Image (cartoon, rainbow, N blue to C red):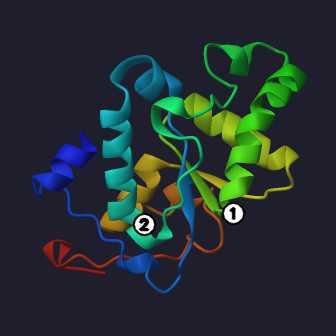
Amino acid sequence: MYAQWIREGKLKPSSEWNKERKIKFTVQDPCQLVRKTLGDPVADDLRYVVKAVVGEENFVDMTPNKSNNFCCGGGGGFLQSGFPEARRAYGQTKANQILATKADYCITPCHNCHAQVHDLSDINGHAWQTVHLWTLLCLSLGVLGPKERAYLGDDLVDVDVFHPEMGEE
């Protein structure tokens, strides 16, 4: 829906905040949404939104990606299964994929992916930060509140986006 709303002009994100920062982002394709149901069209919409939010030049795609992307290892209840070592071992394929992009952040639209990808960054010495798509969309719209910035890295926590429609900075 975000892609549709951006195309229709109902949402007007700005990637200007990242023009000079040049913070690099990659995105995790959620298994349920992309691989198991809606496929590449929704993965393409996901990338459209990400690029509108962070700038096309600051997006680094994983390989493979979209319907061929690898599972993060946390879905299907595995995140809550009580077997963290097995989950992390399975997720190492995803960790290696993220590391190969050299992105500063991995965007995770799914909350299971978010928890797993964040945990994988912890065991990899915080090689990347993990952020929800919704958080970056709000940041790019200039409506991200202070409490919602608590888990962002130092490079994003102070980003302010001015939108003339809002009438304030």
- Residue type beneath disc 2: Val
Q: Residue placed at 47% from the left, 37% from the top?
A: 66
The x and y percentages for residue 70 are 62, 31
**What is the secondary structure assignment of the residue under circle 1?**
loop
Q: Tell me the distance, in whole angstroms, between the alpha carbons under discs 1 and 2.
A: 16 Å
Element on which disc 2 rests: helix
Front residue (pair 137, 88)? 88
Q: Considering only vertical position in the picture, is 142 above or below 111?
A: below
For the image shown, how many numbered marks are present on the structure?
A: 2
Please state if 85 lies on the left or on the right of 110 as rendered.
right
Across and down, in percent, residue 23 comes to 56, 73
Residue furthest to the left in view is 8
- Residue at the image point whose x is 76% and y is 45% from the top: 96
Residue pointed to by mark 1: 102
Dividing the picture into quadrants, the one containing residue 169 is: bottom left
Residue drawn at point x = 76 percent, y = 12 percent = 81
Label at residue 61 = none
Q: How far from the left and from the top, in percent, is residue 62?
A: 58, 49
Do we see residue 20 in this rendering? Answer: yes
Residue 59's place in the image compared with 33, above or below, is below
Q: In percent of the image, x 30 and y 71: which residue is there?
A: 14
Pointer 2 residue: 54
Q: Are marks 1 and 2 in contact (CB under 8 Å)?
A: no
In the rendered image, the vertical position of residue 9 relative to residue 45, given as above or below: below
- Mark 1 Cα shell of 10 Å, populated few (<14), some (14-19), many (≥20): some
